[in-house]
Amino acid sequence: MIVFDKPKALTDAPLHYCPGCTHGIIHRLVAEAIDELGIEGKTIGVAPVGCSVMAYDYFSCDMVEAAHGRAPAVATGIKRSDPSNIVFTYQGDGDLASIGTAETVHAATRNENITVIFVNNAIYGMTGGQMAPTSLPGQVTQTSPYGRDTKLCGFPVRVCEMLSELEGPEYLERVAVNNVKNIKKAKAAIKKAFENQINGKGFSLVEVVSTCPTNWGMTPKDALKWVDDNMIPYYPLGVYKDRSGKEEK
Amino acid sequence: MTEKVLMKGNEAIAEAAIKAGCRHYFGYPITPQTEIAAYMAKRMPKIEGTFLQAESEIAAINMVYGVAATGKRVMTSSSSPGIALKSEGLSYLAGADLPALVVNVQRGGPGLGGIQPSQSDYFQATKAGGHGDFRMIVLAPAFVQEMADLTIKGFDLADKYRMTSMILADGTMGQMMEPVEIREDAEITTYDKPWAVTGTGCKREHNIVNSLFLKPDQLEKTNIERYERYKLIEESEAMYEEFMMEDAEICVVAFGIAARVSQNAIVEARKQGIKVGMIRPITLWPFPKKPLLAAADKVNKFISVELSMGQMVEDIELAIRCKKPVELCNRVGGMIPSPEEVLAKIKEANGGKN
Amino acid sequence: MSTFNILIAGFGGQGVLFAGKCLAYKGLTENKQVSWLPSYGPEMRGGTANCSVILSDTPVGSPIVSNPDVLIAMNLPSLDKYENEAVSGAKIFIDSTLITRKVEREDVEAFYVPATKMAADIGAPTLANMIIIGKMIKETGVVDFDTIEVGLKKVIPARKADMLELNLKALKAGYDL
C-alpha cells in the first residue's frame, strides 16, 4: 500500500496561502529534501518578509524570522555560529532581489555555505500585488497600473544570470513548479542545494519560478499556463552555475 | 592580578569582549571605531572565532541577529551614521528578545557630520534606537578601563535581560590610551538559553525566533512583558559615580569625555571656594534618577555638560522633576568644551561670585 | 612631580605618536597615572599630527592637553599653532633643524635641539623624535632616564628588536646634549 504522507519536516499548522498558490508545493519539496537527507534535527530555517513570512510555523525545524531582505545575513550569522548546522533561507522576489539585493550578492560572493530557496512569482503578494523587481515588462500590477514601463522602472532582475557572473557561488539553478515534470526537477535541484551544504561546497541557490493567481488575477490553472507562456521565456530554466558539475548554461 | 597595559579604548573593548566569551564579530569600517574591527580581524581567527567584514552596517547587525538567535555572545561596533543604519536590526533584536552588544563610538552629526568626538547620539541610544517600543541598556564609559569593564558588564546584562546593551562612547574614548587591566580571573556568568535555535535534534519542539505578532492582543502582551522587565532594570541596574558632592551647591552632570573635562573644572572651582560636585551617569538608560532627585534637594543648580545641543538636559529635568534649574554647557560638531569653559559656566551658575 | 601636560606635535611620519607612547609607557612602569590621546583622521596622512600625553601622580581628568607645560614642536606649523597655547613657564622643545625661527614669548623656556640633523649624524635619520624626547627628559625629569629602556621595550615589538638599540642611542644623544 502506498501512503501519501506529509513530510516530517512540516508541522501540522494549516498553510495560510491562497488557493492555487505554489508556495505549498515548494514548502513540501523543501521538507521532503530535509526528510530524505535526515537533517531535520540540525536544520535551521530563516523565514523572509513576504507571503512566506510565516514559514516559521510550517517547518518543524528551528526557525528564525528575518527582517525584510536580510535573510542571507541572518543565515550567515547562524551558519558561522555553528557550521555543523544546516541553514536555509526561504525568500520571495521582493525580499531577495530588491530590498535584499546586497545581502544576496554578498552571501553568494562569499560562497557562504547556506542554501537559498528563492521563490520568484514576479509580484509582491503579501502587500496586495505591487510591481516586483522581477515583474515582466508590460506586466500590470497595482503600482504599474499601465503595465511595467521599462523606460520608467527599468527591466526585471534575472537573479541566476546575475549571480552566475560571480566567482563565489557553488550552485545556481532555475526551476519551475507549474507541472509534474518541472516539480520533479525542482525537487532534485532543492535536494542538491542541501547536499551541497552538507558536503561543505558553499552557496547554493534554487530559483523557483512560481505563481500568484490572486494578484495576477487568474485562475490557478491559467496562472500555471502563464508561467509557461510568459515567465519561462523571460526566465529560462536550467543550471546557471555548478562548480562541481559539468552542466552549465 | 594581571599586568596593566596601555590600550586604546577601542582595543580595550575588543579584548574585553573576547574575555567575556564573545567569539563572533561583524562590522563595517567607519572612523573613529575601526580599531575594534582591526583588533577582531587579528584575534578572532586565532581563537576559532568569527570576524566578518559585512557588506553594510545593515548586514552586520543582521548577522549579529543570526548569531544571537543561536544563543552565543556576539557584537558589532560602529559610529553614529553606521548606528543609524543598524537601527532596523536593533528593533528586531528587541522584538525577538535577543541579547547582543553594540558599540557606538560617536562622531559629530547629523548627516555625514564629522569624525571628531561627539555625544549627540544620546537621544538615539536612550530613546530612539529604532521603531517600536523598546529600550537598550546604554553604558557610557569615561575611562579606558571602563571601556573594558562595561563591555564585560554589557554582555552580562544583555544575556540576563535578553536585550541589546549599547556601549555609548565617543571618538576620544575610542582613540585614547590609558592603563587598563583585563582581569584573567574575571568571572563570566553563563546563562541558559532554552529559546535558542541550535537544531531540535528531533528531540524537542522547534524554537522560533521571531518578532512578528499579527494579533494585536498578543503583540500588546509582548510589549507589556518587556516593559515589566525594563522596570526591573530601572530599579536595579542604574550606575553612576559621585564626585565632591557632599557639600555641593552646584551639581554638574556629565558622562564620558565631558565628565573628565568637568572633573578638571570642578577641582579648579573648589580651589576657588565654589562648592561644586558632579554626578556622572555610567548608565544612560536606566538613567540614575534617584541620586539626581536626592541632589535636587541640596543643590541650587544643575549644569549639564554635553557634547550635544543639550539632549541629556531633558532627562535631568525629568529626574529632578524640574525642582531646580538645569543649565547647559556644551560644544558640538566634534568640539570638546575646555575645562576653562566649564569653569566659567560653574562661576556663572554660582552667581558670578568668586 | 605633580602633573605633566605634554603636547608633541609635528608632521605625520615624524614619529610623534610613537614618541608619546614611549613616554606614556615609561610613566606607567613608574606607577604614574597616564593618558595618551592622538589627533586622528585625515590630518594624520601627511598633515600635522599631535598627541597629548599626561603623566601625573593623581588620576587624570581630561586627557586633552590644550595648554601644555611641555611642548615639543617638530615643525614650524606646530610651533606657530601651539606656542601661544603653552602655559606661562612652559618648557618648549624645538627641532631647530626644521624650525629656524625662535620662540617669541619671554615667559617660557625654549630649548633648541637640532634633532633632525643629529639623527642623521648618528645614522638614525627617522629618530629625531627620540633625540628631542631625550633632551626633554633631561630638562624636565618627567620620567627616570636610567630605566628608559623599560618603556621602549613595551612599544617596540620583539620582531623589531634591532630598532631598540638605535632608539636608545638616539634618546641618549638627546639626553647628553
Image (spheres, rainbow, N blue to C red):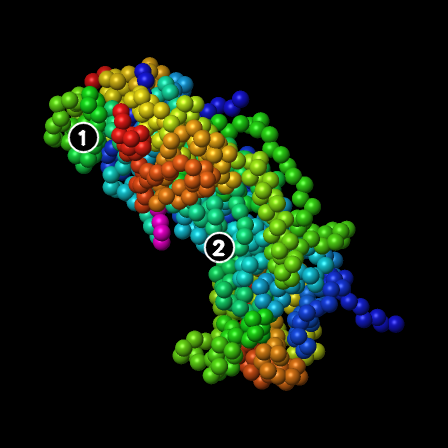
The amino acid pointed to by label 2 is Ile
Question: Which numbered circle lies on residue B306?
Answer: none
- Identify the magenta region: B106-111
Q: Residue C47: percent from the left, percent from the top?
A: 24, 41
Q: Which residue is mark 1?
A: C83
**As displayed, is residue B263 above or below residue B68?**
above
User: Which residue appears farthest toward the top when viewing the image?
Assistant: C146
**As displayed, is residue A213 above or below residue A52?**
below
**As displayed, is residue A212 above or below residue C79?**
below
Label 1 Cα neighbours within 10 Å, binned few <14 / some 14-19 / many ≥20:
many
Q: Which quarter of the figure has residue B327?
A: top left
Q: Is residue B195 visible?
A: yes
Residue B107 highlighted magenta (yes or no): yes
Q: Residue B334: percent from the left, percent from the top?
A: 32, 43
Q: Which quarter of the figure has residue B21?
A: top right
Residue drawn at 68 percent across, 67 percent down: A27
Label 2 Cα neighbours within 10 Å, binned few <14 / some 14-19 / many ≥20:
many
Residue drawn at 29 percent across, 30 percent down: B351
Q: Residue B113: percent from the left, percent from the top?
A: 33, 50
The amino acid pointed to by label 1 is Glu
- The subunit carrying tag 2 is B
